[in-house]
Image: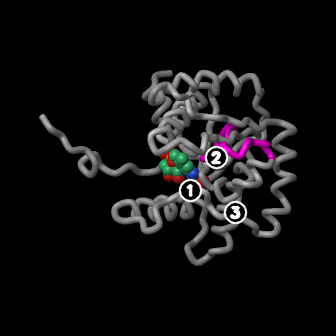
Amino acid sequence: MHVSDALSKRRSTRAFLDTPIETARLTRLIAQASRAPSGGNLQPWHVHLLNGAAMTRFHATMAPRLDAGQTDPLEYPIYPPSLSEPYRTRRFAVGEQMYARLGIPRTDKAKRLEWFHRNWRFFDAPAGLFLFTDRMMGAAQWSDLGGFLQTLMLLLVEDGLASCPQEAWAMHHTAVTDFCDTPPDLMLFCGLAIGIPDPAHPLATFETERAPQTEWLTLHE
Ligand SMILES: Cc1cc2nc3c(=O)[nH]c(=O)nc-3n(C[C@H](O)[C@H](O)[C@H](O)COP(=O)(O)O)c2cc1C
């Protein structure tokens, strides 16, 4: 598979088959993803992979929190507090398009929330990981985490798997760090749901838009 094929096939997948994924397959792909570049070769990523029985145990620890509607104060802002244009419109558009596919109207806030909460079940993916970095790291190293994540997501596609990056886990960072038993100097960035996409789900063919190049490319020649 060419990189460009993997790139166009990758999409945030939010519905998976319950087919188990071998741990060795995942650790191989995660190891490969560490070929991602990072400033100064710091490799500021720390990954906790949950698979099989660990995923079942994790769901069990999350259940009381989710039932109680409990969330944590964010350790980092998922979005800037007041999102300006054109970002605000883009964010709104992707949400509307996704909920339209799911047949959940704007007025049905409860159903939308219920769907959003599926984030905290890894969208029922059989495997998932949490990506942490050292608290001392700054914006430059956080961008390295993005490079690592995209590299891994493309490798997953090449290997017949799909994924969804999930900052939503920032709303449950204490549950995640407790479960993973990470030292206090590690901070959670996001999760990644991993599995085989469910081809029968309404979102299976959902593709997001991209702004035209003229909106963000300035050419000097
Ligand atoms: C770092 C990161 C965090 C994300 N967090 C979430 C999330 O918590 N829940 C979710 O459903 N999608 C999440 N997404 C997926 C984005 O909504 C998605 O990438 C975007 O809409 C573009 O769609 P595509 O990935 O299918 O191309 C996240 C993406 C990134 C890169």
Looking at the rendered structure, the kind of residue marked 2 is Met
| Quadrant of res 29 | top right
Reading the image, the residue beneath label 2 is: 187
Reading the image, the residue beneath label 1 is: 76
From the viewer's side, name the closer residue of 193 and 39: 39
Q: Answer above or below: position of 80 versus 130.
A: below
Q: Earlier in the sequence, mark 3 or mark 2?
A: 3
Q: Which residues are magenta?
A: 179-197
86 lies left or right of 82: left
The disc at residue 72 is: 3
Tell me the element at label 3: loop
Residue at position x 71%, y 46% from top?
184
The residue lying furthest to the bottom in this view is: 107
Q: Position of residue 31 (x, y in %)?
A: 63, 23
Residue at position x 26%, y 52% from top?
215
Which quadrant does the C terminus fall into?
top left
Q: Position of residue 185 (x, y in %)?
A: 66, 43
Looking at the rendered structure, the kind of residue marked 3 is Asp
Q: Answer above or below: position of 125 versus 46.
A: below
Tell me the element at label 2: strand
| Quadrant of res 183 | top right
Residue at position x 67%, y 48% from top?
15
Q: Answer above or below: position of 168 versus 196.
A: below
Is 60 colored magenta in this rendering? no
Q: Are marks 1 and 2 in contact (CB under 8 Å)?
A: yes
